[in-house]
Amino acid sequence: MRIRVPLLLSILLAVAVLVIPSRARAACSSGTELIQTFPVAGPAVSQWRFCYEIVRMPDESGAETQSETLVIREAEFRPGASATPIRVLGEVRMAEIFVPYHSGDPRFHDLTEYAFDLQPLTPTECPATRLDGHRICQEIGDRGLTWRDPYFALARRGEKLVLWSILNAANYDYMMRYEFFDDGTMEVHAASTGRKYGGPDDTAGHMHNFAWRVDLDVAGAGGDTATLRGVRIGPSVKDADKTITREGGFKWDAKAFTHLEVTDGSAVNGRGRPVGYTLAPTREGVAKFPEAWTKYPMWVTRNHPGELRARDVATYAADHEPVAGQDIVVWFTDSHNHENDMRDEDREVVPLSYLGFRLEPQNVWDTTPFYP
Ligand SMILES: [Cu+2]
């Protein structure tokens, strides 16, 4: 959906840009800056720099009065000590938690129908660093073996920075979790924990649908191209890639290994290959409901101010604006099924189980990260 900026306002903005003297860019346009270099100990090689902020989701009129969400903004990754940092994200946020019950009713929109808050975490919940009124847990740690060279005695264990918060939504608590790997990968996860709506004996099944808004600004906001990457499997395996030219929703096909890649034509790595980031789902299933925005698990739209609500994405995409070479936003929904007559392990409190997606660097490095 296009939002027209009044002509007078455009002229005033243009004049302001010309008149105001340029100065060093503030660390963050809003929120708090966080810089993490890797390896955590010893001389720095790679680096993440981003801003984090807790904001409220807009109601249907755009007033930011509804539930809180942890937002990551202006994220940049530097793939080496002397490398140029590359912009990865304008912003990523969880933009809806939609919980329809299997009977058809109720159908909760926990991020836009209510005004739930992120919770202060205790030292037991977060034994690491607690930020922003103890509402964000910052953890740094090992992430296991990342590669091993079968020909030489070379191997590497990776590290990561993790930020997570808990939103209390009445009987449920939801985790919003962002992981920043030393190799430039990001993992974005959600999880639910808490109590069944009707108490321990409640047998009503329901689904938790988590929708994220991902403003991927690969190498800057403009000039981005989204491609659905896939394969066709027969006697041989053929690439089946499709460039997305207009706003809309896109299917995820397990048989095609669907990934959504965003590249920037103006940025190449040291081997001349286009720099990009790929959204790689790790799915349990695809949940479609009568609500139009749930028809597709992935959407691509133009980035327009105020278009922040996942439940309105079908409206945002309704005019099918061109997206090729534009500042684009990727929307992604993943679902967890709490089936009818749940297992007894979920009886008093449902334990956390994670779902979400990865943002994987494409030719951001020239070589295997940290290969000597
Ligand atoms: Cu549940």
Image: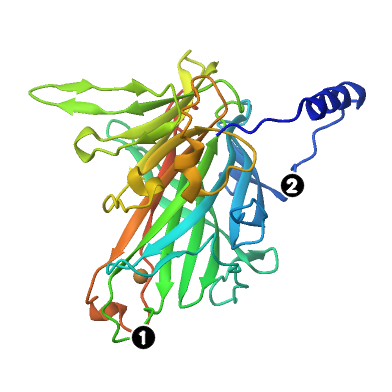
- Residue 91 is situated, as x and y percent measured from the top left of the image, at 59, 42
Q: Quadrant of the N terminus?
A: top right
Are the residues flagged by discs 1 and 2 in contact, CB closer than 8 Å?
Answer: no
Q: Is residue 223 visible?
A: yes
Does mark 1's beta carbon lie closer than 8 Å to ligand 1?
Answer: no
Does mark 2's beta carbon lie closer than 8 Å to ligand 1?
Answer: no
Image quadrant assignment for residue 69: bottom right
Q: Quadrant of ligand 1?
A: bottom left
Query: Quick one: SS at disc 2?
Result: loop
- The kind of residue on which mark 1 rests is Gly
79 or 340, which is in the foreground?
340
Residue that numbered label 1 is attached to = 199
Residue that numbered label 2 is attached to = 30
Numbered-mark total: 2
Question: Mark 1 or 2, which is nearer the eye?
Answer: 1
- Residue 99 is situated, as x and y percent measured from the top left of the image, at 39, 64
For the point 26% across and 22% down, which residue is it? 240
3 or 55, which is in the foreground?
3
Query: Quick one: SS at disc 1?
Result: loop
For the point 54% across and 67% down, which residue is it? 167
For the point 24% across and 69% down, which residue is it? 339
Q: On screen, 284 above or below 113?
A: above
Residue placed furthest toward the left? 235
Task: Work out how far the residue at label 1 is from the one at label 2, CA to CA, in angstroms.
Answer: 41 Å
Numbered tag placed on residue 18 in the rendering: none
